[in-house]
Image: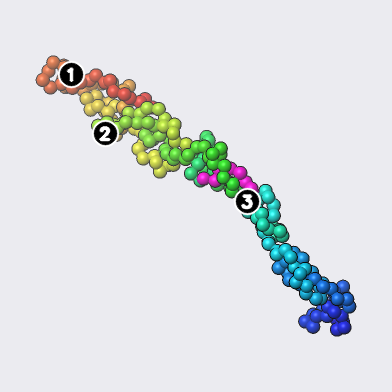
Amino acid sequence: MDVNAETWNAQATIHDSTLCTDEVISGCTSDFYLEYNPLATISDITACNIPKIVGCTNENSTNFNADANQDDDSCIEIILGCTNPEYIEYWNYDSELKTLSSPSQIANTDTEQTSCLNLINEGCTDIDYIETYNFNLFNGFYTLNDVNSSINVTNSSACQNLIVSGCIYDTFSEFNPQANVLNQADCINIIDNVCADPLADVFVDLTINSIYYTI
């Protein structure tokens, strides 16, 4: 700590001889400018020309700052993809189980027109439940058609009615009061005292032509 040096610092507690100089160094002494010279001993305001703008200077970053002239290591890598969580492509998707899981890398640059293709449609996918199928409800009984192909994500809470296949007609001894889906093959033996004559004033129509689904 040379008190005779131009750069003597009365507050210094550790001596660094490289910082001691007897010569007068004119320069920009404000660290708000790119021209800042920490060795300058005399401030020269005319040497301070370009204000320092700190930010991301990498053009391939989501937070690139075209005005920044000093990089601050804040650059965020561009990750292309679907950024809308209402679409399957946003998630990790298991097409067999029809389940979603958190993506390992979340896209931060939207390419929705080309990446977000399939809107999530949750529903029951368990084949033992009514709600998995396209169905109709008539007089308390279901008729089932094809599997509802519009469902692309499993939601077990949507499975409400377990399929109970059986004979739904009480005119047969095989009548199952728990059945909610007709299985015509289960209706075999007609109850003896039932009148099936269509010419009678009161009769039971035993002709089963309803749409049915066999489990």
Residue at the disc numbered 3? 62
Amino acid type, label 2: Gly
Amino acid type, label 3: Thr
Foreground pick, 195 / 26 = 26
Q: Which tag is nearer the camera, tag 2 or tag 1? A: 2
Residue 123: image quadrant is top left
Name which of mark 3 and mark 2 comes first in the sequence. Answer: 3
Which stretch did the figure color magenta? 76-84
Asked whether 201 falls inside the magenta stretch, the response is no
Q: Position of residue 183 (x, y in %)?
A: 33, 25
Which residue is located at x 77 percent, y 82 percent? 11
Which residue is located at x 15 percent, y 21 percent? 203
Residue at the disc numbered 1? 196
Q: Which tag is nearer the camera, tag 1 or tag 3? A: 3
Crowding around mark 1 (Cα neighbors within 10 Å: few <14, some 14 to 19, many 20+) is some
Which residue is located at x 25 percent, y 27 percent? 169
Say if 144 sits above or below 53 in the image. above
Crowding around mark 3 (Cα neighbors within 10 Å: few <14, some 14 to 19, many 20+) is some
Q: Secondary structure at mark 3?
A: loop
